[in-house]
Amino acid sequence: MGVWMDISEVSKQTGIPSSALRYYEQKGLIASVREKGERRRYAATVLDQLALIALGQAAGLALDDIRSMLSPYGPPNIDRQLLAAKADEIDALIKHLKAMRNGLRHAAACPAPSHVECPSFQKLLKAAASGALEKRWGKTKLHAPRK
Amino acid sequence: MGVWMDISEVSKQTGIPSSALRYYEQKGLIASVREKGERRRYAATVLDQLALIALGQAAGLALDDIRSMLSPYGPPNIDRQLLAAKADEIDALIKHLKAMRNGLRHAAACPAPSHVECPSFQKLLKAAASGALEKRWGKTKLHAPRK
DNA sequence: CATTGACTTGAAGTTGACTTCAACTTCTAG
DNA sequence: CTAGAAGTTGAAGTCAACTTCAAGTCAATG
């Protein structure tokens, strides 16, 4: 690994498929250099940037949001407010998830939630129904395939 | 509200748009009756079923998974194993989210994570990069619009 | 009886983050 | 020099859970 890495090297080191790398570049999140020929060459800093992208994604930010923190050349200018806000959101989410988890555990253990005889189950249903954690939080895929 | 409700009534009571109700029916999650005419009529039990759907969604289940717990006629047969597994997943997710939140808070407060000088930030990046919480957990939209 | 508003259908569109494809071009090893 | 691996492009496809649309049906009201 010299000063410049080619796309497959970056892909190998990060686990991010090259198609995604091109996509990120096209979206303006990362940059590449074409020294000679038409192939991309990446500076080592791209690894930090990709890590930051992963961080943002894990925090639930959209790529467009992340881009604004990622002045593709030079160091990132992190939007601390946004991060703090996201932290708060995550906090709230954690609360709801805890409730869900408790509810699920109860539902899994309670012998009689067949037609909603169990008051706890009722409560769970209500909690879930109250759009507390608005709409599906997505395909979490805790053990997802990144083929 | 008598024994049968029409689609707009159900929609009103649950907040679920009628288009979604038709979609659920098409997917085999709920059932309707056509007494006369070609309009749908829903039994009161559909409300419980919809609550269960909301619960499942909040727990991160796909509609296809939910359907299997939702024998559209008669009481639901809840898959306790699946629920328990989901609870475990959520637990793991909570752990990661806590790490993320701490990391984000730090990143938002730390004065110098410009080019990754801060070791804590480094750690955060690593944690995020390690596909711990595999791929975006989606558009959580903590305060989403259900227009 | 006619208008209006709610309902019906199947099909197509939406969103975000990618992936896949076809058709080339370019490196690299032999 | 030449094959074949790896890179390039723009465009199109994918996935889930819906929404939107067009065109037609039905029911209640004046």
Image (spheres, coloured by chain):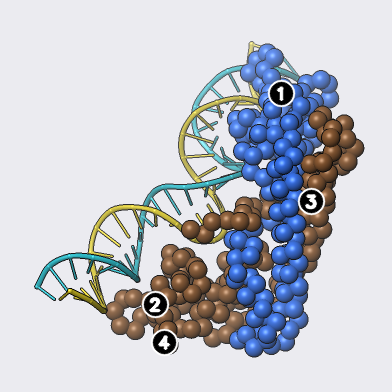
Chain colours: A blue, B brown, C cyan, D yellow
Q: Residues within 10 Å of mark 1 (few under 14, many from 20)?
A: few
**Residue B13: which numbered mark, if any?**
none
Report helix, strand or loop for mark 2: loop
**Badge 4: few (under 14), some or many (20 or more) residues near its Cα, within 10 Å?**
few
* Residue B48 can be seen, yes or no: yes
| Res B6 label | 2
Give, as a three-letter code, the residue at label 4: Gly
Separation of disc 3 and disc 2 at Cα? Answer: 44 Å
Q: Look at the numbered disc 4 and give the secondary structure of its residue.
A: loop
Label 1 amino acid?
A: Tyr
Report if the CB atoms under discs 4 and 2 are less than 8 Å apart. Answer: no
Is residue A31 placed above or below D22 in the rendered structure? above
Q: Chain of mark 2?
A: B
Q: Which residue is mark 3?
A: B101
Give the Cα distance between marks 4 and 2.
Answer: 10 Å
Quarter of the image with the N terminus of chain A in it: top right
The tag earlier along the polypeptide, 4 or 3, is: 4
Residue A145: horizontal and vertical position, in percent?
71, 51
Q: Chain of mark 1?
A: A
Instruction: Have a look at marks 1 and 2 and say if they share a chain.
Output: no
Is B79 positioned to the left or the right of B1 in the image? right
Residue B92 % position (x, y)? 80, 61
Q: In the image, which is nearer the foreground, mark 4 or mark 2?
A: 4
- Are the residues at dot 1 and dot 2 in contact (C-beta closer than 8 Å)? no
> Chain ID for label 3?
B
In which quadrant of the rendered view does residue A44 lie? top right
